[in-house]
């Protein structure tokens, strides 16, 4: 495959990723703006659209998928996510504990 074909393929991937991310963002905003569902369902829809958009960003912009060569990158992202969630969760536990003690 020559460089020109590689460039076109990569550019096409970025365009598909951009269009998908834009469509998912617009769908989330439309769901909230036009009150298409009850509040609980709307939160679920927006959360699901966010997870799908996370996958789109991983696949099209960060080039991370489930192939053998990208598993190290995926493990690094998952570990970083775990550490971040532990830090945020611990902070929230401490803050809520302090809040309840002040009441």
Image (spheres, rainbow, N blue to C red):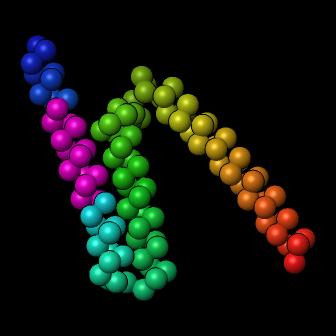
**Which residue occupies the foreground of this view, 6 or 69?**
6
Q: State the image coordinates of residue 89 (x, y, percent, origin top left).
A: 71, 54
Name the main secondary structure of what is drawn in magenta.
helix
Per the rendered image, the range of residues in magenta is 11-24
Q: Residue 56, image x and y in percent?
A: 33, 46
| Vertical relation: 20 (above or below) 1 | below
Note whether 98 is above or below 55 in the view shown: below
Based on the picture, tell me whether residue 44 belongs to the magenta stretch.
no
Residue drawn 39% across the image and 29% down it:
67
* Quadrant containing the N terminus in the rendered view: top left
Q: Quadrant of residue 47?
A: bottom left
Q: Quadrant of the C terminus?
A: bottom right
Position of residue 85 in the picture relative to residue 47 (left or right): right
Q: Is residue 43 left or right of residue 98?
A: left
Say how many tags the image has.
Answer: 0
Where residue 42 appears, x then y in whole percent?
42, 77
Q: Which residue is found at the position 15% from the left and 36% from the top?
A: 12
Pick out the residue farthest to the right: 101
Which residue sits furthest top? Answer: 2
Q: What residue sits 18% from the left and 41% below the top? A: 15
The quadrant holding residue 13 is top left
Residue 30 placement: quadrant: bottom left
Which of the two residues, 103 or 70, is positioned nearer the viewer here?
103
Horizontal side of residue 39 vs 20, given as left or right: right
Q: Residue at x 10, y 22 (%)?
A: 5
For this orientation, the residue located farthest to the front is: 102
Image height of 10 relative to 54, above or below: above
Q: Where residue 48 appears, x then y in whole percent?
A: 42, 63
13 within the magenta span:
yes
């Amino acid at each position: 495959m020559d460089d020109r074909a590689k460039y076109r393929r990569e550019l096409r991937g970025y365009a598909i990723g951009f269009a998908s991310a834009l469509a998912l963002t617009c769908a989330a905003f439309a769901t909230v703006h036009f009150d298409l569902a009850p509040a609980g369902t709307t939160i679920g829809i927006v959360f699901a659209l966010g997870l799908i958009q996370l996958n789109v960003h991983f696949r099209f912009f960060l080039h991370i998928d489930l192939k053998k060569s990208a598993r190290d990158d995926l493990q690094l992202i998952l570990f970083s996510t775990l550490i971040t969630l532990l830090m945020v969760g611990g902070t929230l536990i401490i803050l809520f504990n302090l809040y309840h003690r002040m009441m």
